[in-house]
Each structure stands twice: as structure tokens, then as C-alpha cells.
Image (tube, rainbow, N blue to C red):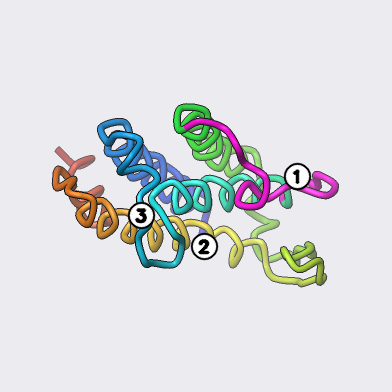
Amino acid sequence: MNKKYFLELADYNIWANNIAIEWLNQINDEQWKQAITSSFSSIEQTAIHIAGAEKIWIDRWTNIQNPVFLTAEFKGTKNELIEIWRKSSADLKTFIEKYPEENYNQQLTFKRLNSEEYTMEFAQTYSHIINHSTFHRGQLVTMLRQTGFTKVSSTDLITYYRVIQK
């Protein structure tokens, strides 16, 4: 794992999140809030979770004391969430641009959501958040289809590689 690869993953994450956000911009409030059985109870809650997870990892990496997880606190609009999500995606890349590659294997101690302290290598946390967002974007596809929205497209990493190589 090196900075070039991590920046590539950050660019991929921004690209894929922008596609998902475009889907969200096309659905109505009923679809946004519709109860659906999945990891989270609605498209809204799933989107809050993705944006919140990206944001909390940045907060952990930058030593923000007592970071707030959006899933527990967010009460804003879809547009407000989208702005938070776009900023978090961009902030992931900005963080990697500035973070020294020699620190990728350093241990990072943070508090989990249940307040327990936990330690992992920085590189593992970064890989995790990229994978985590990918997983939940996949759930968004299924949830969107269940609400009748079918204008979804692939956000797979291989699709990203094909798109950027053109």
C-alpha cells in the first residue's frame, strides 16, 4: 500500500459517492424515507450512515475530541446531508494527500461507537472506510430499486478504472 494507491482509492470513493448522490438527487421524499428492510431502515438512514462513517474516520485521524456520529445525531435535510457527504469524501482525499506514507503502518488508537478504545494500523482503517462505503453504496442500489428507482449504474472499482482510462 502506498500513497499513489490510497489517492487512487480516494478518487474512486469520490467518483462512486458522486454517482450515488446523483441517484439521491433524483428520488422524492417518499422514496428517501420509505421503510425498507436492510442494514438500515431507509435510503435516508443508509446515506446518513455512509456519510457519517466517512466523517467520523476523518475526525478520528485528526484527533477531534468526542466526534459525533451522524447516525445518532443528524436531523437535517437530504441536501444538507449530501453537502456533508461531498465534503467528507473530499476530506478523505485531502487527508491522504497530506498524510505521510511512512505513517501508514503506525497504530491508531480511537474510541469505537460504544466508547471502547481500539487500536488498528492507519492503513487498515483507511482500507476499511473505502470498503465500508462500497458495501453500503451497494445496499443503496438494492434499496433504490425497491422504491421503484431503476436508473442505477455500476459503482464498482473496475468500472471506475474503465471510466478513467478513457
Position in image of residue 51 (x %, y %): 52, 45
Q: Is residue 104 left or right of residue 90?
A: right
**Sequence-first tag of 3 and 2:** 2
Q: Pointer 1: what residue?
A: 62
- Seen at 33% across and 45% down, the residue is 16
Position in image of residue 120 (x %, y %): 70, 71
Q: Pointer 3: what residue?
A: 137
Residue interval drawn in magenta: 61-77
Q: Where, by quadrant of the figure, is residue 31 drawn?
A: top left
Identified by mark 1, the residue type is Thr
Label 2 near label 1: C-beta < 8 Å? no
Q: Is residue 151 left or right of residue 4?
A: left
Residue 127 is tagged as 2
- Seen at 52% across and 53% down, the residue is 49
Identified by mark 3, the residue type is Arg
- Taking 89 as reference, is 61 above or below it? below
- Seen at 20% across and 52% down, the residue is 154
Cα separation, mark 1 vs mark 3, equals 25 Å
